[in-house]
Amino acid sequence: MDETGVLCRSISLYVKSSGAGWWQHICREANIAAHVMAHVETRWDERMVWIDDPPTCLIYQLQLDNVAAFI
């Protein structure tokens, strides 16, 4: 099992044992904004927080997804 698999398994076991949440698969086509964010170049040593406005690179995709709360 690769590192990602180990991490996912650990999270899954924690969620099941604690009752703290649940898993749900969301296909890429229904969650393109998250896919865009996963491919945005960022420096890993930099912390980023968005409070009121989404990153510029996401605005177009959020409009396509009809996420009115963020626009």
Image (cartoon, grey):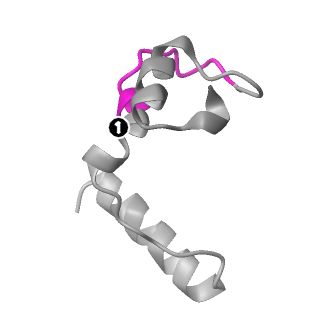
Residue 44 spot, x, y in % from top left: 53, 22
What residue do we see at 50% from left, 67% from top?
11
| Residue 47 among those drawn in magenta | yes
What residue do we see at 39% from left, 70% from top?
9
Is residue 60 or residue 5 the one in the foreground?
60
Q: In which image quadrant can residue 15 be found?
A: bottom right
| Residue 49 among those drawn in magenta | no
What residue do we see at 48% from left, 79% from top?
13
Q: Quadrant of the C terminus?
A: top right
> SS for tag 1?
helix
Is residue 2 or residue 11 the one in the foreground?
11
The three-letter code of the residue at mark 1 reads Ile
Magenta-highlighted residues: 35-48
Residue 35 relative to residue 16: left or right: left
Residue that label 1 marks: 32
Is the magenta region chiefly helix, strand or loop? loop
Is residue 12 or residue 62 the one in the foreground?
62
Residue 32 spot, x, y in % from top left: 35, 37
* Residue lying furthest right: 51
Q: Is residue 17 above or below residue 24?
A: below
